[in-house]
Amino acid sequence: MKNLLRLGQFLCVLTVVLAAGFVANASEFDKKTIFTFSQPVELPGVALPAGTYVFKVLDSLSDRNIVQVFNKDETKLIGTFVTIPDYTPQPSDKTIVKFSETSAGGPKAIKEWFYPGENVGWEFVYPKKRAVELAKASHQAVPSMPDNMTSNITQQAKNSSDSSVIALKQTPIKAEEANGAEEEVAHVFIIIMPTDASFHPTPHSVNNDADEAANNQR
């Protein structure tokens, strides 16, 4: 059913809770978070080998929906990604990543990222062709952008004024349904933005263990 708060709408989604392992140097503004993945994972337009990565929200006061991912020591930008806000009614005190179900044998596709203590997170927007495939495999709607925007993801953007970032911020976003239909994103995803100080949590710990604890959450 459309236009309902997606309370518990995580069928066929793998949930990874990264428990305390070491303290990340978190920033309240950029939400810096260190992830260690024991297996290859997928982000829009990018495949990440197993390893450690740094996730940050880009330095924009006006648009908090652009996420950048770096290598472990932040010497290389892996990609700049457009997201839409996602909502959970029960924020966790740990960092959470949710994965979309994919076809057998493929890497897990990162669907959402939630920062500790926040009920609003980031849902990644995939190029249309891949979004259609993920929607069919997961039986859930997936936000999409035109395929020709993919090249902007790997541009070496330094700040929110770079042309590749502006292009991502301005790209039209749709929702690809599991049945192959394409809808307006606002008809499928309800975007709830924070209205109080809960969007400014304290530094936190994340997992440095290569074995994530994954389970189907219904």
Image (cartoon, grey):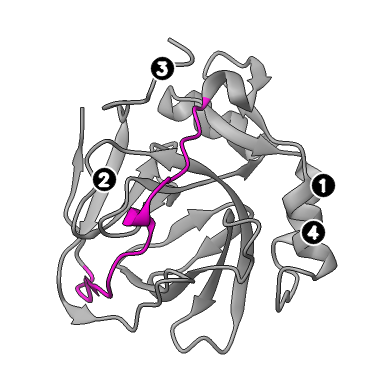
User: Which residue corresponds to the image point at 80% horizontal and 63% vertical from the top-left?
Assistant: 164
Q: Amino acid at mark 4?
A: Ile
The magenta span reads: 189-210
Q: Determine which of the numbered discs, if any, sits on residue 15 in the image.
A: 2
Q: Amino acid at mark 2?
A: Thr
The answer to whether residue 19 is left or right of residue 16 is left
Q: Position of residue 217 (x, y in %)?
A: 20, 34
Name the element at disc 1: helix
**Depth-wise, is mark 1 or mark 3 nearer the camera?**
3
**In terms of sequence position, does the residue under pointer 1 or pointer 2 come before the other?**
2
Per the model, the C-alpha gap separating discs 4 and 1 is 14 Å
Question: Which quadrant of the figure contains the C terminus?
Answer: top left
The residue carrying mark 3 is: 4
The answer to whether residue 89 is left or right of residue 2 is left
**Mark 1 and 3 residues: CB-CB less than 8 Å, in contact?**
no
The residue carrying mark 1 is: 148
**Residue farthest toward the front in the current orientation of the protein:** 196
**In terms of sequence position, does the residue under pointer 4 or pointer 2 come before the other?**
2
Which of 47 and 155 lies nearest the eye of the viewer? 155
Q: Is residue 156 magenta?
A: no
The residue carrying mark 4 is: 166
